[in-house]
Image: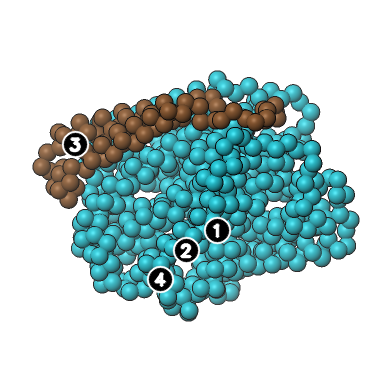
Chain colours: A brown, B cyan
Amino acid sequence: MLFDIRRILGGLFAVYGVILVVAGLLDGAEEIAKAEGVRINLWTGIGMLVLAGVFLLWERLRPKDVPDPSDDTSGDA
Amino acid sequence: MLALAPQDLRLDVNALDYLILALYFAVVVGIGFAARRAIRSSSDFFLAGRALPAWITGLAFVSANLGAIEILGMAANGAQYGLMTVHYYWIGAIPAMVFLGIVMMPFYYRSKVHSVPEFLRRRFNPATQLFNAIAFAVAQVLIAGINLYALALVMEALLGWPLWLSVIVSAAIVLAYITLGGLSSAIYNEVMQFFVIIAGLVPVVVLGLIRVGGFEGLGQKVRESVLGEGGLHTWSTTATTDNPLGASWIGIVFGLGFVLSFGYWTTNFAEVQRGLSARNTNAARLTPIVAAYPKLLIPVVTVIPGLVALVLFSNLGKDGGPAYNYAIPLLMNEFLPNGVLGVAVTGLLASFMAGMAANISGFNTVFTYDIWKGHVNGDKPDEFYVRLGRIATVGGVVAGIGTAFIAAGFSNIMNYLQALFAFFNAPLFATFIIGLFWKRMTPWAGFWGIIAGTLAAFAVYIPYRADLIDLGTDLNASFVAAGAAFLVDAIVSVVITLVTTPKPEEELRGLVYGLTDVDLKDDSLAGDRAWYRSPVVLGSGALVLAAAFYLPFL
């Protein structure tokens, strides 16, 4: 495989997560009232950080998702 | 209840939302550049090197179908038809996806074809390949253009972007990452898009449910709405066509669940291509089955918002009010503060682009292999075809932009064409299923079966649209048209087979059930024997879940 998509997913959602958590902490009464009294930016941000953690941890625990082939399947151009 | 005028669709986006959107596009184009470095052969460009694990190809498979037209359209159906919309998922998709994985994918994958038309050439003849390739290529470019136009309309309504700006910007981004990275780029972006669209929709669902008083409150309010009690049932009202969908159980089971859905899911190359890029036969078979699990749950983020919008906005879908298609954008506007709003807008834009990218990556493969290499010039070096694939990508995107601007002028004609293209798949399934299980079926039976089936669909659908015959609802008309295509294809295939010569068995090895290709190596990997990687176990699990999900909503 050319590069690991799990690292990119983990990275993107980590950045999104941080942005949303910060936005959520700064949200004023107006934003919270709009979202039915829920700090939705904060919660979504936390959710994204968890998702990012899962992808990064998965990549770390099983760096190569591809188990070694029992026979060579490459070479079919 | 709130009454809304169309201008209320404008979202209050700010710099934070645009930052989230810009970050996404940067990553998308970055993936294109990273994927480019790994492209050394045509197999890398058109088949992602046949190296991907099932979870990636599976998520790409579900994502290629999760375009924004699908999401907005299914939410619209939710508002219009109520819970019966889940039929499009639980019976209209899952069984066909499981069938593709368990029965058909081994033939596609192990024959090492690049495309569905190429499989038709191997099983039947070059004429069958060419007809299917041209029909597919034209349809993909036009659908990509219609997609672009729809995207531009939504962006104009939500963000105030002028039509031409949305068309050019999104076409340029799709062009960049497909030309650079080919299919791997398309697939990686589809996986990313899947998570972003879900991340954008879940907050809408949660906040919407809080507003209407949870599932119980939603049920209560739907009962009091124009849908009434019928909006909360899936099967118990289908003895007659007197239900919101206007379809009986026979139409739902055979029309939607069999002819339409098997035609679409098992022969549509824009979907099947994801499985062909898998790393071995087992991963290819698991591709549509892995996709079935998220597909089971997608109604949560489409049908529920549709119902919430129905009970919140009194003039949704009525004269002077916003169209049903705007159910989800209306809820985004109602509930999401800046930040999450940016994620939802990004998800919507990303899914428009992923839909278009799936069309374009299917188009460039079919153009290069099935039209050019197969019928114009087939003995150039491998690099030539990679270059040709890139040129075809540019051509496809430019033609798509042209289509988008034509669609802007003649949107009715475009809708009509799009409906017609849906019927290219209906007869194909009949040809495939007969050709896979009946080794005697002849090459010319394949060709004439598909032609006759396609014409039969048109012969039913065009008079319906011209008001010459009455078939009830649009949905019923498409059931009848697809059913006619299937039957005529099957009859013509059998009749032609009886009067023409079949291919010798030697040429059909690996392409027909029961004629195995003894030269093929077993390509299974260590760990493929585990139950959680068994297509039959996981496929059965998806079917059981689909049936179980119906129980609370009979």
Question: Which numbered disc, 1 or 2, marks the residue that appears first in the sequence?
Answer: 1
Nearer to us: label 2 or label 3: 2
Q: In the rendering, which numbered label is found on residue A24?
A: 3
B100 horizontally vs B520: left or right: left
Q: In the rendering, which numbered label is found on residue B95?
A: 1
Nearer to us: label 2 or label 4: 2
Nearer to us: label 1 or label 2: 2
A37 horizontally vs B459: left or right: left
Residue type at mark 4?
Answer: Leu
Give the chain letter at badge 2: B
Give the chain letter at badge 3: A
Rendered location of residue B1, percent (x, y): 20, 63
- Same chain for mark 2 and mark 3? The answer is no
Question: Which numbered disc, 2 or 4, marks the residue that appears first in the sequence?
Answer: 2
What is the distance, in whole Å, between disc 1 and disc 2 at their CAs? 10 Å
Residue labelled with disc 4: B554
Residue type at mark 2?
Answer: Ala
In which image quadrant can residue B259 be found?
Answer: bottom right
What is the distance, in whole Å, between disc 2 and disc 3 at their CAs? 40 Å
**Circle 1: element type:** helix
**Crowd rating for badge 1 (residues with CA inside 10 Å; few <14, some 14–19, many 20+):** many
**Crowd rating for badge 4 (residues with CA inside 10 Å; few <14, some 14–19, many 20+):** few
Residue type at mark 1?
Answer: Pro
* Relative height, residue B430 to residue B528 (above, below): below
Nearer to us: label 4 or label 3: 4
Residue labelled with disc 2: B547
Q: Which residue is rendered at x = 80% and y = 46% of the image?
A: B509
**Crowd rating for badge 2 (residues with CA inside 10 Å; few <14, some 14–19, many 20+):** few
**Circle 2: element type:** helix
Give the chain letter at badge 4: B
